[in-house]
Amino acid sequence: MTEKEKKEKIPRQPMPEQDPKKRSMNFDEVPYGYTPELAQKEASRCLQCKKPKCVEGCPVGVKIPEFINLIAEGDFIGAAKKLKEDNSLPAVCGRVCPQESQCEALCVLGKKDEPVAVGRLERFAADYERAQGTVDLPQLPPPTGKKVAVVGSGPAGLTLAGDLIKFGHQVTIFEALHKPGGVLVYGIPEFRLPKAIVEAEVDYLKRLGVEIKYNHVVGKILTVDELLEMGYDAVFLGVGAGLPVFMNIPGENLCGIYSANEYLTRSNLMKAYLFPKYDTPIAVGKNVAVIGGGNVAMDSARTALRLGANNVHIVYRRSKTELPARAEEVHHAEEEGVQFKFLTAPLRYIGNADGWVTGMECIQMELGEPDDSGRRRPVPIEDSNFTLDVDLAVIAIGTGANPIITGTIPNLELNKWGYIVADEATGKTSRERVYAGGDIVTGAATVILAMGAGRNSSQAIHQYLMNKS
Amino acid sequence: MFKILEKWEMADNTVCHFKIEAPLIAKKAQPGQFVVLRPNETGERIPLTMAGTDPAQGTIDIIFQVVGKTTALLRTLQKGDAILDIIGPLGRPTHVEKLGTVICVGGGTGIAVLYPITRALQEIGNHVISIVGARTKYLLILEDEMKNVSDEFFITTDDGSYGRHGFVTDALKDLLDERTDIKLVVGIGPVPMMKFVCKTTEPYGVKTLVSLNTIMVDATGMCGACRATVGGKTQFCCVDGPEFDGHQVDFDELMKRQAAYLKEERQSYERFQKEQE
Ligand SMILES: Cc1cc2nc3c(=O)[nH]c(=O)nc-3n(C[C@H](O)[C@H](O)[C@H](O)COP(=O)(O)OP(=O)(O)OC[C@H]3O[C@@H](n4cnc5c(N)ncnc54)[C@H](O)[C@@H]3O)c2cc1C
Ligand SMILES: Cc1cc2nc3c(=O)[nH]c(=O)nc-3n(C[C@H](O)[C@H](O)[C@H](O)COP(=O)(O)OP(=O)(O)OC[C@H]3O[C@@H](n4cnc5c(N)ncnc54)[C@H](O)[C@@H]3O)c2cc1C
Ligand code: SF4
Ligand code: FES
């Protein structure tokens, strides 16, 4: 038996998780994570490839075989440190990255068997380190005397802030909301990404000396030009794609119809799921329709279940294979009882005298020729209309660029959708000393891509600052 | 944390006025803009208009009516206490220009929202006629302040206990009948009042601005909670407003959307009142 054949004998280790019946009624995190034993067992499956395919699939090039080897050897803290060389938020990425289309998609074991559970191992190492108490601070270089303003505290801004402070620059983050983390706090629910994890990451940055100013809507209280005049040597814009997209169909302004942004912000950021202990209310539907098929739709649907809905439908205009959500989220949603209505699109909402939604007229679709995205285009089937009883609908069909800041920066080049035009490798924009990255450049994408953009910009800003003097 | 420097109560303690330390916001704020505040960790984010600002002293003024949990909670705060979060200035400033003769109509706590706009309209050189109204005499707020920034000044009360007996719209209609030089009407108050102000001015073809107090969450254009139909199109009041051409506004939809959480609001308020006992 060759070394390879021996390793394949150990199956991919599942991660223990809460029972679907029980968890669909609480907001606690779904998976419990690996125990050290399970982690070591899973890590031992890795072949330690000389030319690891997995790393090619990772947008930030995490040293995957190296960190997995450290886990196999029982050096969990060492594994966490190794991860952090390339990824400053491993506890977050281990939970939310679409591994099945990144590292794990390319893992050689996946050809015959199941790939190594890179994501679960990443999560394990990061959680292990956090559970040990305070994470050691690295030695910082002497201050350079340069100051950088970061707008937005999502994954792009946090990554960049962490890098720049470690180069010895002074960093201030300006955040519009009252909490840091961007989508990680206002969008992704507690049961998928506990807020304590984001807080721990932000605390670490604060201990390194990053200053965070909350409640600062840049473009309103201060403009980017004012920041530059105030003595910031460079500004990074990591403001995300925070503009809800509606469908502009009749009845969309009835009560009980939310954008996913509003629904999730109420529940996550404002903790409406703890109403009345927390003051912000949220409508609890009995029959809920969530329109869309991405992670945002899955999060909304699973939130609705937990808030007490009897029936939650995901209404998606293509078929199951086209669902853009992570496979794990779809699987979890199905397990918890979310019902899927594929090849269905809403046409209009019906309301009662009080202005509340009572129904949604839909039309059946079929898949036609592939469109620009390469996916088969959904086409309505004539006379296939039907009405779904709903008392709550959440629209999760995507987000756009919010003009609140971009509209106040003269000469900043935007593309036709309002996103900032920035160089992919450096984040440089058409404005000198102004850099941008994350969803506000790419449109709604992923946590790891936003982090990668933050990393690229931090290198470019550092170079710029050091050449300047 | 934002410190409360002064506190006054008015209208038989149903309305509260805070002067708050917020230097950066004070420096930037313009008439018509508002702030969002969250009193404490478990609190809701609510929008309140800045009734005044003092950039030199670094302060802003808010005047609010106690209508539910959050405003009742705010009222329990005293001089020296602090509010956890204040975000602003938000919304588009009022477009203030010299037009000639303008009428400013305010009802209830809407007068607090109207006041800085009225002042700005007068400062730029308009002839300002103000009509302020309340249900009854003791509920009328900012009488002297409004008088000071108006060239002509009228008061109405629903019960006739002060000023003219009747609604602000009665006084408004008389003015529109008497004068043909009215270039603009600004009407701010409870939604039914704004709706009737618009109904009153419509036959005269006088442009009418209203300020829409929709429910808001982030107030930065991120959620759409504040959407209203204006001219057949959906607008986000927090970034596209709060002021709109009143003749284009779907007031009935607005009223229904404002009432979306009545049940929860009552529950919250009752819970709070029990806690206070
Ligand atoms: C519900 C949901 C679920 C998701 N699930 C996943 C997932 O499972 N896996 C995955 O990889 N990705 C997921 N995503 C996508 C991912 O979260 C985003 O791509 C990522 O967060 C983008 O990061 P960012 O730093 O560019 O911006 P954001 O995370 O959007 O952060 C931007 C920050 O900037 C602040 N800001 C905006 N304007 C201003 C201003 N004018 N002044 C000051 N601050 C401002 C915002 O308040 C916010 O805090 C999900 C997104 C959502 C909404
Ligand atoms: C742009 C704007 C400016 C405003 N300026 C003033 C002002 O200067 N003075 C003043 O007294 N009031 C003002 N309001 C109204 C004020 O925000 C509400 O009275 C307040 O939110 C009530 O909160 P509550 O918890 O005390 O009462 P609740 O019992 O929660 O609500 C009472 C009513 O207030 C409205 N309301 C509730 N929650 C919100 C929310 N999050 N956002 C907006 N409205 C809500 C609803 O219509 C509700 O029926 C303004 C509203 C807007 C949108
Ligand atoms: S490709 Fe798979 S087996 Fe090879 S190093 Fe990466 S995780 Fe290990
Ligand atoms: S309050 Fe959220 S978009 Fe206006």
Image (cartoon, rainbow, N blue to C red):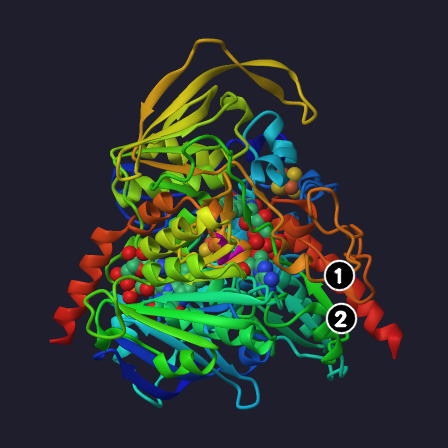
Dots 2, 1 in contact, CB < 8 A:
yes
**Magenta stretch, overall SS:** strand
Q: Position of residue A224 (x, y in %)?
A: 70, 68
Question: Tag 2, which secondary structure?
Answer: strand
Quarter of the rendered image showing ligand 2:
bottom left
View extreme (front): residue: B178
- Decide which of A292, B159 is in the foreground and name it: B159
Say above or below: A265 vs B60: above
Q: Position of residue A377 (x, y in %)?
A: 61, 19
Which callout, 2 or 1, points at the residue further toward the start of the chain?
Answer: 2
Residue position for label 1: A435
**Which amino acid is tagged 2?**
Ala
Label 1 marks a residue whose chain is A
Counting other residues with Cα less than 10 Å from the Cα at mark 1, is it few (<14), some (14-19), or many (20 or more)?
Answer: many
Q: Is residue A210 left or right of residue B212?
A: right
Q: Which residue is mark 2?
A: A234
Percent x, y of residue A352? 27, 33
For residue B105, side relative to residue A243 (left or right): left
When asked about the image quadrant of residue A287, the answer is top left
**Depth check: A295 or B120 in front?**
B120
Figure quadrant of residue A398:
top right
> Horizontal and vertical percent for residue B105?
40, 65
Q: Residue furthest top?
A: A383
User: Range of the magenta residues?
Assistant: B241-245
Q: Where residue B196 is drawn, which disc sits there?
A: none
The image quarter containing residue B277 is: bottom left
Q: Secondary structure at mark 1?
A: strand
Kindly identify the amino acid type of the residue bearing the numbered disc 1.
Tyr
Q: Is residue B19 above or below residue A214?
A: below
